[in-house]
Amino acid sequence: MIRKTLLAALVGSTLVLATPFLAYADTTPVATSATPTPSQVITQYADIAYANYADSLSSAKALQTAINAFIAAPSAETQQAAKTAWIKARAIYSQTEVFRFGNPNVDDWEGQVNAWPLDEGLIDYVQADAYEYEDGNKFATANIIAGTEPITSELLKSYQEKGGSEANVAIGYHAVEFLLWGQDLNTDPKSAGQRSYTDYLKGEACSNGHCERRAEYLKTVTDLLVQDLETMVKDWAPDQDNYRKTFLALDEKEAMRRVLFGMGSLSLGELAGQRMNVALLAHSQEDEHSCFSDNTHDDIFRNIQGIQNVYTGYYVKADGSVLEGANIAQLVASKEAKIDADLKAKLTDSLKNAEAIVSTAQAGSSFDQQIAADNANNALVKATIDALKNQTAAIESAAGALGIQNLNPEPLEEE
């Protein structure tokens, strides 16, 4: 249950937004007593996936418009408008990550839009004395933007995981983020990256060189993001010969297994593990999810919200309308009411703990500060990790109540 206590997301350290779909508003579904069929629950899951990706596409197009305006007339104001559009887009996209695990179409595709952490020195200049490659060489100029190859979508895609290195990230949300914010060098605990709009000016006003190529890169990578999201919307669109059709044709128990596997995998291995515990144990800013914008607190909250959306069959669209229908909670409650109540309580606890991370970030201590060594706010992060672990155990119990003992999905033909 999401309480109406946090009303906006922090952009950098200064701009507060109050857009309806950015607000941490109450999205608790109204309880119903009817027990749906598994087929109805699975269809509702696909409907939410389609709606969430459609909203992600719409917000990415708004980001594209803002970035085009920034490139056409670089200024502090147009740059901030592009940053604001990125934050809005992330708030929506982060809720879709629950669909990644268990759905091979999403898992195979996700790296194109959300890969991290990225080696920013691959893309653009970095501060040489703050950046060191594994071989010990320090440099700030050998990158795609400083190169001579024409910047095209094909070129950028060719650098993605080049040489088998997952750090070679050239496309997706975080590449756009870096190009808007620049490195977060952590010189001010309250600030995100401080890239100036002058990095996009022409002629002698250009700072740090290669401004026209930087603008070409930003436009190209944003256009690619929109194209990739269009692919996912098509994959989940109703009445098409697509992945949705394949998913809905699965044995009902197998489809439900995939849904629960997605919830548990995001909850434990990805969010509690890779995105939070790794960063906390290493006390490493480089291991946080949205490190350039200092938006990681919102990523965490929205990921948990996405898990709740799936369990309750309830999604608040970007326009404020609600998609509500048959859900797993009803099925579990019909079998084991105590298990359903426990999972709902665990989801609420995870969200409350994530709210503490968000409110602390809004007060001026971003996630990279919260995970720093000897920072008292380590306890907030640890509490959220523990809550996610408890939540995952409750998800496994819910699966057991539905007769699903093994959450590992059976391979699909295309897998």
Image (tube, rainbow, N blue to C red):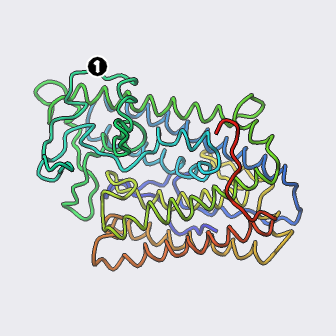
Q: Residue at x 25, y 49 (%)?
A: 183
Q: Nearer the viewer, residue 228 or 353?
A: 228
For the point 43% across and 76% down, which residue is it? Answer: 380
| Horizontal arrangement in the rendering, residue 282 relative to residue 27 (left or right) | left
Q: Quadrant of residue 148?
A: top left
Identify which amino acid the numbered label 1 is placed on.
Pro
Is residue 403 visible from the viewing direction of this image? yes
Q: Decide: few, some or many residues near mark 1? Use Cα within 10 Å; few <14, some 14-19, many ≥20.
A: some
Residue 69 in sight here = no
State the residue at coordinates (58%, 59%): 265
Q: Nearer the viewer, residue 365 or 43?
A: 43
Q: Position of residue 293 (x, y in %)?
A: 34, 52
Picture layout, residue 312 above or below residue 323: below
Horizontal and vertical percent for residue 142? 18, 35
Q: Is residue 200 left or right of residue 116?
A: left
Looking at the picture, how far across and down is residue 365, in whole percent?
32, 68
Between 71 and 185, which is closer to the camera in this rendering? 185
Image quadrant where one finds the N terminus: bottom right
Q: Which residue is mark 1?
A: 150
Above-or-below relation of 110 to 309:
above
- In depth, the one of 177 and 160 nearer the eye is 160
Q: Residue at x 71, y 31 (%)?
A: 242
Q: Measured along the vertical axis of the image, is residue 189 above or below residue 241?
A: below
